[in-house]
Image (cartoon, rainbow, N blue to C red):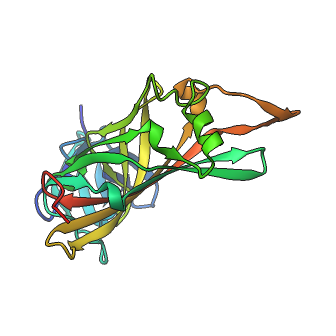
């Protein structure tokens, strides 16, 4: 049996998944807290009869407070709750396919070296596309990175990283990431969960994504920019190189940070430049 129910929507009418409905009694004591499902629906357990306060919140949206009247049966209906975007939120790119521009996109992996410094490696060859949906949270993405394109600026080190002790690029030439949606965390930030395939291993990872905006470029196209980052544990991908230079200190750390700065061009393919 449910208690207080509601359905959370945007001003445009789209459901707000993961919106939070909090209910407090007249003394301010919290008596319920529930999260909206993918359709924007929320439903609490039966509540004490009387008049309570319900507040609906979601990252990137202005909170909404309502008075909730709960019957003797413990039930109540708030109906539709409409959330408006917070002031200053960036405008989102138009729906449709957007193609990654490899010339203006970078993928950087950073690992600890000798426990005291960092090594940065750039993957020079990245491709893929983002299919922007409406609502934006239903957008999907796919990216491919050529493993052999790794570049630290030192050829001997790059060859070692391409070897079977690390990326084994002959056996696993491509690194891929595929996502089927996002969760909003702020006015211009999202979490994008997806599957990363690296070194023959497939793992679920989450990218923290910041949208930089979109606009016309000098070549007659429209571009959008995203920054994304995540932390990986290379042991999760069977990259278990563990050379030790001194007691307790590994030559290369087991945690790798990925930073992606991605430019995408509106359309199925890149325009001639």
In the figure, 163 relative to 249: above or below? above
Q: Nearer the viewer, residue 27 or 224?
A: 224
Taking the spot 21% from the left edge, 76% from the top edge, the residue there is 218
In screen coordinates, is 103 left or right of 113? left
In screen coordinates, is 199 left or right of 223? right
Q: Quadrant of the C terminus?
A: bottom left
Q: Nearer the viewer, residue 60 or 118?
A: 118
Asked if residue 152 shows in the view, the reply is: yes
Taking the spot 26% from the left edge, 62% from the top edge, the residue there is 67
Q: Residue 104 lies in what quarter of the image?
A: bottom left
The x, y position of residue 76, in whole percent, is 20, 48
Taking the spot 45% from the left edge, 43% from the top edge, the residue there is 149
Q: Residue 267 lies in what quarter of the image?
A: bottom left
In the figure, 44 relative to 217: above or below? above
Q: Quadrant of the N terminus?
A: top left
Q: Nearer the viewer, residue 219 or 13?
A: 219
Asked if residue 71 shows in the view, the reply is: no
Q: Nearer the viewer, residue 16 or 177?
A: 177
In the figure, 172 relative to 105: above or below? above
The x, y position of residue 154, in whole percent, is 63, 48
Furthest residue in direction right, as rendered: 247
Tally of numbered discs: 0
The x, y position of residue 6, in whole percent, is 19, 49
Q: Residue 219 lies in what quarter of the image?
A: bottom left
Furthest residue in direction front, as rendered: 155
């Amino acid at each position: 049996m449910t208690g207080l129910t509601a359905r959370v929507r945007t001003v445009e009418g789209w459901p707000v998944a993961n919106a939070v409905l909090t209910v407090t009694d007249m003394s301010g004591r919290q008596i319920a807290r529930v999260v909206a499902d993918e359709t924007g629906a929320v439903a609490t357990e039966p509540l004490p009869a009387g008049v309570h306060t319900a507040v609906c919140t979601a990252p990137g949206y202005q909170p909404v407070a309502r008075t909730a009247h709960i019957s003797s049966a413990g039930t109540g209906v708030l109906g539709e709750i409409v959330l408006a975007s917070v002031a200053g939120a960036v405008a989102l790119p138009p729906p449709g396919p957007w193609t990654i521009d490899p010339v203006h996109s970078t993928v950087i992996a950073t690992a600890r070296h000798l426990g005291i410094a960092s090594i940065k490696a750039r993957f020079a060859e990245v491709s893929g596309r983002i299919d922007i949906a409406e609502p934006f949270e239903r957008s999907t993405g796919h990216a491919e990175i050529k493993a052999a394109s790794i570049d630290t600026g030192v050829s001997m080190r790059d060859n070692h990283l391409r070897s079977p002790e690390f990326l084994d690029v002959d056996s696993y030439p491509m690194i891929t990431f595929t996502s089927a949606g996002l969760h909003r965390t702020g006015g211009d930030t999202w979490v994008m969960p997806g599957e990363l395939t690296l070194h023959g291993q497939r793992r679920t990872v989450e990218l923290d994504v910041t949208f930089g905006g979109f606009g016309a470029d000098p070549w007659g196209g429209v571009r959008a920019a995203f920054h994304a980052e995540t932390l990986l544990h290379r042991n999760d991908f069977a990259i278990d190189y563990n050379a030790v230079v001194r007691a307790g200190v590994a030559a290369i750390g087991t945690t790798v940070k990925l930073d992606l700065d991605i430019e995408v061009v509106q359309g199925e393919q890149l325009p001639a430049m």
